[in-house]
Every structure is written in structure tokens, then in C-alpha cells.
Image (spheres, helix red, strand yellow):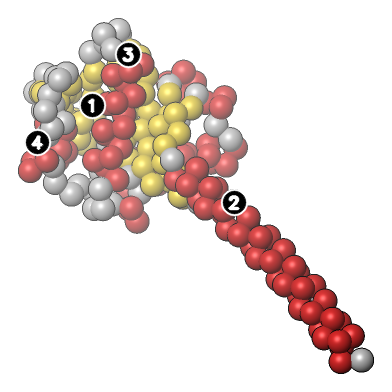
């Protein structure tokens, strides 16, 4: 009788152990999936317009109009035909865009435009990362093309730290001061000159 009770208890323990182990495996697999999804959603994306999901496009246009129309009080056609053939670079974190710009060809040169970091993501390095990612992408995709940017005047030093040089006098567009700047390839980035910047270009 004693032996039978022990055997029954042992069987129950084994059953409980197997059940607990199965639950642990299930939880672990879900954690791995969540980590994998979180990692992938934080990665940089390089997409044409037709490759963007409806949600990504909504997030991009929402931030662009918030920064370039609302924040800068500029009434202009923010969404234009360039979006149709540009490469859209963005870094997402769940339901927000941490940084964004678009890269496209115009007059034989590569242009970087609509450079932005949302207000809640500024001053923590996203702007620097965005520019480095964009320049790395361009170096691979357009190795022989010149790279030009229309920079807001207050960001002149920021872009110079990456190797951009002035190619125009100060001018105003939509009542905002700008410079045209050209990228000097093989420039060594001087990290001491890269400041935390409220990047909205």
C-alpha cells in the first residue's frame, strides 16, 4: 500500500513537472517572439512608397506635417510628387517614428530631404544616427553621385560636422533661412563638433 501511494505521488510530481515545463517553454517562446519583433521594429527601414505599409505611411505623413507645417508655421504643399520615387528612410519604435528622411535624385545629384526627428525623440542622438545611416545608404546605392542638402541655417554646423560644405549664400524659402550644402566624400566625422540638435529639416 505504501509503495503504491509513493508511486502515485511520483506520477503526480512527474505530471506537474511536465505541465510546468510546457508552460515555461510556451512563455519562453513568446518572450523570444516579442524580443524579435521589438528588435525588428527598431531597425532602420529603406523603402519605396509602394513598399510602405499603410501604418508606416500614416506615421511618416503625420510627423512630417507636424514638424514642417505645424511647428514651422509654413503653409505649403508638404506631400509632393518626389514621394513617389524617393527612398524613405525611417526608424520606428512601436507606434512612433524616431527619425525619418527621404533620399532621391534631382538634376543628377542625390538629395536628402524632409529630415526630421519628432520632438519627443530629440536631443538623444537620433539626428546624428539618421544622417550617418542616410550617408551610408547613399554611399552604397549611389557611389558616384554628389550629395546635396537644403539645410536650415541653424543646422549649418551640424551638417558641416558630417562633411557638408556651403555652396550658396543664405536665402529664405517659406520665410525660413536656408543654405544649400554639398557633401564632401571621405570626410572624417569630428565627433567633438556634433552637437545635440533639435533636428527638423
In space, the residues marked 1 and 3 are separated at their CA atoms by 19 Å
Q: Residue at x 35, y 49 (%)?
A: 118
Mark 3 surroundings within 10 Å by alpha-carbon count, few (fewer than 14), some (14 through 19), many (20 or more): some
Say if 101 sits above or below 35 in the image.
Answer: above
Q: Are marks 2 and 4 in contact (CB under 8 Å)?
A: no
Q: Reading the chain from its start, which is encountered first: label 2 or label 4?
A: 2
Say if 159 sits above or below 25 in the image.
Answer: above
Give the quarter of the figure containing the C terminus: top left
Question: Of discs 1 and 3, which sits in the foreground?
Answer: 3
Task: Return the residue at label 2.
Answer: 33
Of residues 5 and 73, the one nearer the viewer is 5
Q: Residue at x 16, y 31 (%)?
A: 162
Q: Reading the chain from its start, which is encountered first: label 3 or label 2?
A: 2
Judged from the image, the secondary structure of the residue bearing numbered disc 4 is loop
Task: Return the residue at label 1.
Answer: 150
Q: Is residue 94 left or right of residue 121?
A: right
Q: Residue at x 53, y 39 (%)?
A: 56
| Count of numbered marks | 4
Question: Of discs 3 and 2, which sits in the foreground?
Answer: 2
Whether residue 201 is visible: yes
Give the quarter of the figure containing the N terminus: bottom right
Residue 45: image x %, image y %? 45, 34
Task: Return the residue at label 3.
Answer: 142
Amino acid at each position: 500500500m505504501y509503495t503504491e501511494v509513493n508511486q502515485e505521488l511520483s506520477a503526480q510530481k512527474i505530471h506537474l513537472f511536465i505541465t510546468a515545463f510546457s508552460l515555461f517553454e510556451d512563455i519562453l517562446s513568446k518572450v523570444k517572439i516579442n524580443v524579435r519583433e521589438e528588435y525588428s521594429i527598431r531597425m532602420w527601414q529603406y523603402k519605396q512608397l509602394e513598399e510602405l505599409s499603410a501604418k508606416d505611411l500614416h506615421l511618416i505623413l503625420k510627423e512630417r506635417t507636424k514638424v514642417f507645417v505645424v511647428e514651422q508655421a509654413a503653409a505649403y504643399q508638404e506631400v509632393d510628387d518626389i514621394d513617389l520615387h524617393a527612398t524613405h528612410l525611417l526608424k520606428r519604435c512601436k507606434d512612433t517614428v524616431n527619425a525619418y528622411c527621404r533620399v532621391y535624385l534631382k538634376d543628377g545629384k542625390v538629395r536628402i530631404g524632409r529630415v526630421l526627428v519628432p520632438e519627443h525623440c530629440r536631443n538623444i542622438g537620433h539626428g546624428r544616427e539618421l544622417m550617418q545611416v542616410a550617408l551610408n545608404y547613399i554611399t552604397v546605392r549611389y557611389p558616384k553621385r554628389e550629395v546635396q542638402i537644403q539645410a536650415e541655417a541653424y543646422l549649418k554646423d551640424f551638417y558641416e560636422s558630417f562633411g557638408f560644405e556651403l555652396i550658396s549664400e543664405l536665402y529664405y524659402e517659406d520665410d525660413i533661412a536656408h543654405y544649400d550644402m554639398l557633401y564632401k566624400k571621405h570626410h572624417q566625422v569630428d565627433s567633438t563638433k556634433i552637437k545635440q540638435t533639435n533636428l527638423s529639416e
